[in-house]
Amino acid sequence: MRGSLGQVIRELRRRRGLTQKDLAGPELSKSYISQLERDLVRPSLDTLLLLADRLEVPLTELTARLDPHQAAQHALYLAATLHQLGETEAAWSALARWVPWRGEEPPSAAGAQLSPGLATSLAALAAEIRWQLGDEEGALQLAESAMAAADDAPAEARVRALLVAGQVYLARALILRAHRAWEEAATLVERAPDEVPPTLRRRLYRWLADVHQRAGDPDLARHWEEAERRLRAQVADLPAAARYHVERARRLGERPAATLQLAAALALAEAAELLAEPQPRRAPGGGRPPSGPIRTPA
């Protein structure tokens, strides 16, 4: 079915023999449905779910007509929440259509319409997810794509990409290259600490401590261990740990209710990680860091 979201909803409603009042039900109003069918309002994903159920169509029949930026923003939060909760495969499924993959453009034509900042955020998170799935090459490809973004890309996305790239380098025993990536990430965090979630900062500090320890520099290793301890002390309660995403949701302004609910879930999941006791340091992927001499970058 062709047409805008409002046109599609009107056509589906008429096919079902429903009036605008019928479609609105107790949750919405007739005037809201009238505005929606004229594309004068932008519905939340919660509202679309309700309408899809009433119109007896898959949700994708309606979300395909959403503004691409809105749909991709929701996909980013959904994937981040699933990833934080350990649902890595599901997180990748939520992102796959929005990111360049194996040298190809995003499967969704809508991907080309995304803002550079959002596209960078999607690629950086996708890199982290591919790494968790054991795809070293795919993770590095996506991380380098995000790292190549303009300087005005979100600090969180650039830090996340640098962290993933450093993990790949460390797994390949290219410790100096990993160190450079993480030092660059540390510089970004120093410039804009409020734009990088505490969980990313904590991982960065732990990995910098590890790489300096292995490079034979215990003083710098202790410096980053102390930075991690200070961060944990600053977020020793749930409200403080969730503050990053609360403030971020406020900055985003009007967003679908479902997206804000995901933001809240993500904040709680990240708070749990921050409040957990640090585990013995391990290499990415679950094994111990590779031993042996430091190899200089190729």
Image (cartoon, rainbow, N blue to C red):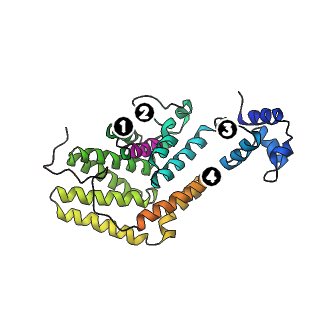
Secondary structure state at the residue bearing disc 4: helix
Q: Position of residue 265 (x, y in %)?
A: 54, 58
Give the mark nearer the N terminus: 1 vs 4. 1
Q: Identify which residue, 192 or 100, lies in the foreground.
A: 100
Image: magenta residue range: 120-130
At a point 45% along the width and 60% down the height, the residue shown is 194
Q: CA distance from mark 4 to mark 2?
A: 27 Å
Q: Position of residue 174 (x, y in %)?
A: 21, 45
Labelled disc at residue 258: 4
Labelled disc at residue 97: none
Indicate the amino acid at tag 4: Ala
| Residue, disc 2 | 101
Secondary structure state at the residue bearing disc 1: helix
Q: Disc 2 vs disc 3: Cβ atoms closer than 8 Å?
A: no
Q: Quadrant of residue 177?
A: top left
Give the mark nearer the N terminus: 4 vs 2. 2
Give the mark nearer the N terminus: 3 vs 4. 3
Q: Is residue 152 visible?
A: no
Residue 176 is one of the magenta-drawn residues: no
Indicate the amino acid at tag 2: Trp
Question: Relative to residue 280, is residue 84 drawn left or right?
Answer: right
Label 1 environment density (alpha carbons within 10 Å; few <14, some 14–19, many ≥20): many
Q: CA distance from mark 1 to mark 2?
A: 8 Å
Residue 121 is one of the magenta-drawn residues: yes
Labelled disc at residue 58: 3
| Residue, disc 1 | 138
Q: Position of residue 292 (x, y in %)?
A: 13, 50
Indicate the amino acid at tag 3: Pro
Q: Disc 1 vs disc 2: Cβ atoms closer than 8 Å?
A: yes
Label 4 environment density (alpha carbons within 10 Å; few <14, some 14–19, many ≥20): some
Q: Nearer the viewer, mark 3 or mark 1?
A: 3
Q: CA distance from mark 2 to mark 3?
A: 27 Å
